Image (cartoon, rainbow, N blue to C red):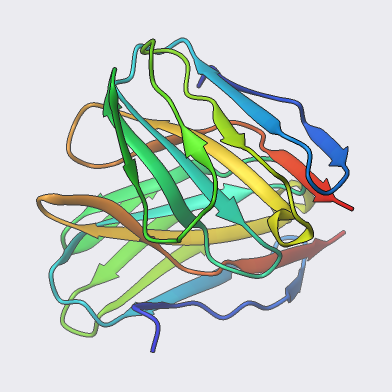
């Protein structure tokens, strides 16, 4: 069983919708949680970074971490066609700097 | 904005050829990484380096080798390419804090015929 599970999608929503992307994980030692966005034929770029539990907001993006449920989420408000990309979650444990990645969710925002 | 560059972007090559994928960063990061990415799959770490003259193999077994003679340069070499090496190769470097915020290059899409 994979340490990090992520629904591959694709997830197709209309422009302006609120999008929810999720990952579940099994290792309770994970403390650093990241969301990366990857456009087609590009490398991933860091979108959100959260340490331990709680919420973090940056513009239209909100990252949530629920360590008790081993569940992380990325919310996108007022979604735009330019948000169409693959979203990858990644996480690591304190003192272990190697990231464990989800397989990514492909998101399509329809105009 | 991250400054990490990979060349070539695309490479089509025949079986048995030796290839080197180039990666350079201008951020002064000590840590650098090579990942392999296949469609719909997780990124798999194949090599990493924590500084000059430091290289380690990652979780995914790979027939490639790397070197780190200069901080800014982290090339990956395949001595004899095979069709099974066809994949996207992503180079990254990371922020010095222990959060592993990675900055990626645009990748090299390798096709071995």
Q: Measuring from the top left, give residue A10's x and y in whole percent.
A: 73, 75
> Which quadrant holds residue B40?
bottom right
Q: Position of residue B72 (x, y in %)?
A: 43, 13
Q: Quadrant of residue A111?
A: bottom right
Does the image show residue A59?
no
* Residue B8 to residue A62: above or below: above
Outermost residue toward the bottom in this view: A1
Q: Nearer the viewer, residue B56 or A100?
A: B56
From the viewer's perspective, is residue B51 above or below residue A111? above
Residue at 46 percent across and 32 percent down: it is: B66
**Front one among B31 and B101:** B31
Instruction: Give how far across and how far down residue A19 sits, in percent.
Output: 59, 68
How many numbered marks have been drawn onto this rendered protein structure? 0
Q: Residue at x 56, y 81 (%)?
A: A7
Q: Is residue A22 left or right of residue B14?
A: left
In the rendered image, the vertical position of residue B38 relative to residue B67, given as above or below:
below
Residue lying at 33% horizontally and 47% vertically, measured from the top left: A49
Quick one: A54 or B9, which is closer to the camera? Answer: B9
Q: Is residue B96 above or below residue A79?
A: above
Residue A91 lies in quadrant? bottom left
Q: Nearer the viewer, residue B62 or A53?
A: B62
Q: Can residue B30 be spotted in the picture? A: yes
Q: Is residue B98 left or right of residue B84?
A: left
In the figure, is residue A81 to the left or right of B71? right
Q: Position of residue B1 (x, y in %)?
A: 52, 19
């Amino acid at each position: 069983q994979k340490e990090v599970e992520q629904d591959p999608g694709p997830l197709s929503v209309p422009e302006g919708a609120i999008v929810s992307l999720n990952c579940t994980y099994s290792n309770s030692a994970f403390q650093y949680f990241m969301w990366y966005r990857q456009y087609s034929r590009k490398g991933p770029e860091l979108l959100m970074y959260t340490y331990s539990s709680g919420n973090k907001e940056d513009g239209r993006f909100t990252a949530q971490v629920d360590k008790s449920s081993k569940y992380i989420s990325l919310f996108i408000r007022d979604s735009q066609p330019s948000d169409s990309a693959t979203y990858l979650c990644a996480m690591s444990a304190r003192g272990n700097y190697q990231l464990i990645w989800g397989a990514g969710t492909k998101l399509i925002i329809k105009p | 904005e991250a400054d990490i560059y990979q060349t070539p972007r695309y490479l089509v090559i025949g079986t048995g050829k030796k290839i080197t994928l180039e990666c350079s960063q201008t951020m002064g990061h000590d840590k650098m990484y090579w990942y392999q990415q296949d469609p719909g799959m997780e990124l798999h770490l194949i090599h990493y380096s924590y500084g000059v003259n430091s290289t380690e193999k990652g979780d995914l077994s790979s027939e490639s080798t790397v070197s780190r003679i200069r901080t800014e340069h982290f090339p990956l070499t395949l001595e004899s390419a095979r069709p099974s090496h066809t994949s996207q190769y992503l180079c990254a470097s990371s922020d010095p804090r222990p959060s592993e915020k990675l900055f990626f290059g645009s990748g090299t899409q390798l096709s071995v015929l």
